[in-house]
Image (tube, grey):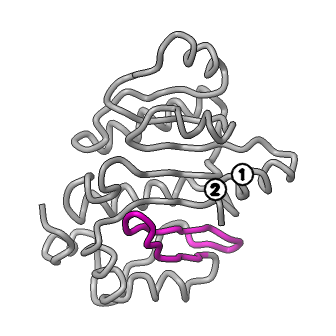
Amino acid sequence: MEIKDFVEKRKLQNTPVYGLDLLSSTTALQSLNVDGIAVGLGDPRDEEEKKEDEDKRSIVTTNLLTEKKKSWELIEKMMSKMEITSFDLILQRGVGGLESIGGPLRRMYHLQKMWKHLSEGGIILTEVKDTDLEYLQDYGWIKLWQSTPGIKVRPLNLKCAGLLISKGKNAPDSLPIPSGITSIKELAKDKLSKE
């Protein structure tokens, strides 16, 4: 599914379509003609881009990689200011996608936060490290998510490894954790691409 096709289908439902682009500027959101929030270390937009974004798109300037809780607090504050209750599309690219967000605890924290703020029918599109994708497949994460009502997940292998995760009706509040792992903290002991 092309992202543009997904966005157009959402727009046909006559509701606003909001996007969250992590580790980026508003360029992708602009190209899709989607309102929302981008998160980055700075604001690289020129005056023309800022004018185009006015009242549509904002940048939250924070270090998502090292200040995870503060970053999500800032995102949530901007959501409130922009009257965004959830996102239809969450992109997490950067160089290496989730790989760039540190160890397994940090990656799962961000993935759970993305899921929490994803609207019903929305999608998360993220790059992952090849070894992370293998881990998620080999240790049953993807199979568990695929078997959970309300979650659809599809591994992608385009220019790099990736995941497309969608949230349907009756989806759980958080992404489930395989039974061999009793808490997110146990991930620290796991071998998911150690820092």
Based on the displayed image, in which of its 4 quarters is residue 177 positioned?
bottom left
Identify residue for label 2.
3
| Contact check, label 2 and label 1, Cβ < 8 Å | yes
Nearer to us in this view, 147 or 57: 57
Q: Amino acid at mark 1?
A: Val
Q: Magenta segment: does it hold 168?
A: yes
Q: Is residue 49 left or right of residue 9?
A: left
Marks 2 and 1 sit apart, C-alpha to C-alpha, by 6 Å
Say if the magenta span includes residue 64.
no
Q: Quadrant of the C terminus?
A: bottom left
Towards the viewer: 148 or 163: 163
**Residue at the location (30% across, 44% down)?**
68
Residue count near mark 2 (Cα–Cα under 10 Å), binned few <14, some 14–19, many ≥20: few
* The magenta segment: 151-172
Determine whether 29 is above or below 44 in the image.
Answer: below
Percent across and percent down for residue 141 are 39, 82
SS for callout 2:
helix
Q: Give the answer, above or below, for where 128 lies relative to 86.
A: below
186 vs 137: above or below: above
As drawn, 167 above or below 31: below
- State the mark number for residue 167: none
> Quarter-wise, where is residue 168 in the image?
bottom right
Q: Is residue 97 left or right of residue 125?
A: left
The residue sitting at 31% across, 88% down in the picture is: 139
> Which residue bears the numbered disc 1?
7
